Image (cartoon, rainbow, N blue to C red):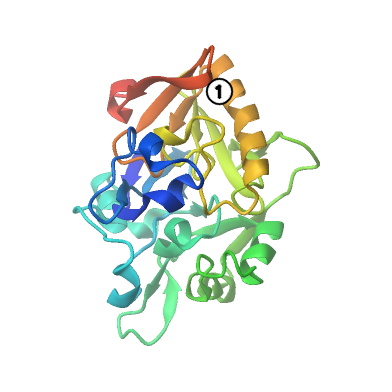
Amino acid sequence: MRIHPIEAGNFKLDGGAMFGIVPKALWQKTNPADINNMIDMGSRCMLIEAGNRLILIDVGMGDKQPESFFKFYYRWGDFNLKSSINKAGFSCDDITDVFFTHLHFDHCGGGVIWDNSKAFLKPMFKNAHYWSNVKHWEWATKPNPRERASFLEENLTPVHSSGCLKFVPGHSSGFEYKDCLGFDVLFVDGHTEKQMIPKITYQGKTLVFVADLIPTAGHIPVPYVMGYDTRPLLSMEEKGVFLKDAADNNYYLFMEHDVHNEIITLKNTEKGVRLDKVYTFNELFC
């Protein structure tokens, strides 16, 4: 197995929305805001070489939307999904599997593109299966008013109509991991219904792609949950269980949205689980 971080593009989001009821005086210590109250966000995906499979976890928001859409997200920097895949030594046609942690547009939008004539939308990875799970797919395709702006039909319909959609088997009960595509998956429901958190054993370390369970290192304290979470009390419960597990077992957390902290570890303190160390991917896995 070999793993590559894939940078799909940076953007900005409202800091208050990202930290919910937490006062700005607290969250700006770790996530400083600009004059518009926007904080830096990343779209750091993961590419896994495993035997004859090349698995991409999440794909960023893509670039197919009109400029009127992107004016709310202040995209910045030079990263994009295709060039990052190319830099890792692959083409988009080499991807065999695209695994979506969940179907909010900033995690799945890059999986669909316009055809050359801009007449219709199609999957970007023509040789890949696209993976979700049944309960989350139903949740996304029949969205509640809270998440309707995050589940976009143009990101979902082309995947379904192309025949490339596959479903990860659901878990039976409780806070547990389940094997899928050669790695374990944790199902969590606080942010959205049945978000999937991959856990990979790599070079003797446990690497967890934490997606929106812990968006940035600033979100480690249990009460620091996003205003976007549909079930914030459940988010706190799930995060508390996960943080203890991660600290006790020395998990390395692969941060999808944290521009400035690529991989972090945690430690137990008198105040609860807190940030321990910060690494770049290449420092750990050169």
Split into 4 quadrants, where in the image is the C terminus? top left
Which residue is at 47% across, 60% downward?
Answer: 108
Residue situated in front as seen by the camera: 164 or 193: 193
Q: Amino acid at mark 1?
A: Ala
* Image position of 118 with respect to 162: above or below: below
Q: Say left or right for 85 vs 227.
A: left
Split into 4 quadrants, where in the image is the N terminus? top left
Q: Position of residue 207 (x, y in %)?
A: 48, 28
* Image position of 223 with respect to 269: above or below: below
Crowding near pointer 1: few (<14 within 10 Å), some, many (20+)?
Answer: many
Q: Which residue is mark 1?
A: 246
Q: Position of residue 172 (x, y in %)?
A: 80, 42
Q: Is residue 1 visible?
A: no
Which residue is at 43% across, 78% downward?
Answer: 121
Which residue is at 51% across, 37% downward?
Answer: 224
**Residue closest to the far left:** 78
* Image position of 228 with respect to 279: above or below: below
* Image position of 33 with respect to 154: above or below: above
**Could you tell me which secondary element the residue under label 1 belongs to?**
helix
Q: Is residue 88 visible?
A: yes
